Amino acid sequence: MPVSHVFDTYAKKAKGGIMHFDVVIDEQDPQKALECARKWLESVGHSDAVVTQETCYFCHSAEAPAELRKQIDEQGYAIYKLEGCPKD
């Protein structure tokens, strides 16, 4: 299995509060991670949340668990929700 790269990400919600999540991708590419974070935020109704390169940064590399691997294979990235994220 390929090694994936984890980007620790914090997005500031427009109405206050922070969403903390990891963006997991197969490339160690900070710009792609930021684009994926923004794409995901838009998909969950938070397109007005603020996320920048300073708040979306490389953390570590590891083999992605099966659930995240499936997301990466299907959409090119996976999101691992940590704090303040919508429940689905």
Image (cartoon, rainbow, N blue to C red):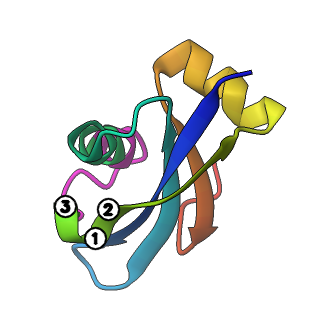
Residue 43: in magenta span: yes
In this rendering, the answer to whether 41 lies above or below 2 is below
In the displayed image of the protein, which residue is found farthest to the bottom? 16
Question: Which label sits on residue 53?
Answer: 3
Residue drawn at x 35%, y 49% as measured from the top left: 41
Secondary element type, mark 2: strand
- Measured as percent of width and height from the top left, residue 84 is found at 53, 74
Residue receiving disc 2? 56
* Viewer-nearest residue: 51 or 85: 51
**Mark 3 vs 2: CB contact within 8 A:** yes
Residue drawn at x 27%, y 36% as measured from the top left: 32
In this rendering, the answer to whether 2 lies above or below 88 is above
In this rendering, the answer to whether 66 lies above or below 9 is above
- Measured as percent of width and height from the top left, residue 78 is found at 55, 37
Residue 18: in magenta span: no
**Mark 1 vs 2: CB contact within 8 A:** yes
Quarter where residue 10 is shown: bottom left
Task: Please indicate, yes or no, whether residue 52 appears anywhere in the rendered image.
Answer: no
CA gap between label 1 and label 2 equals: 4 Å
Residue receiving disc 1? 55
Secondary element type, mark 3: helix
**Mark 3 vs 1: CB contact within 8 A:** yes
**From which residue to which does the magenta span run?**
39-50
Residue drawn at x 48%, y 71% as measured from the top left: 20
Amino acid bearing label 2: Cys
Amino acid bearing label 3: Gln
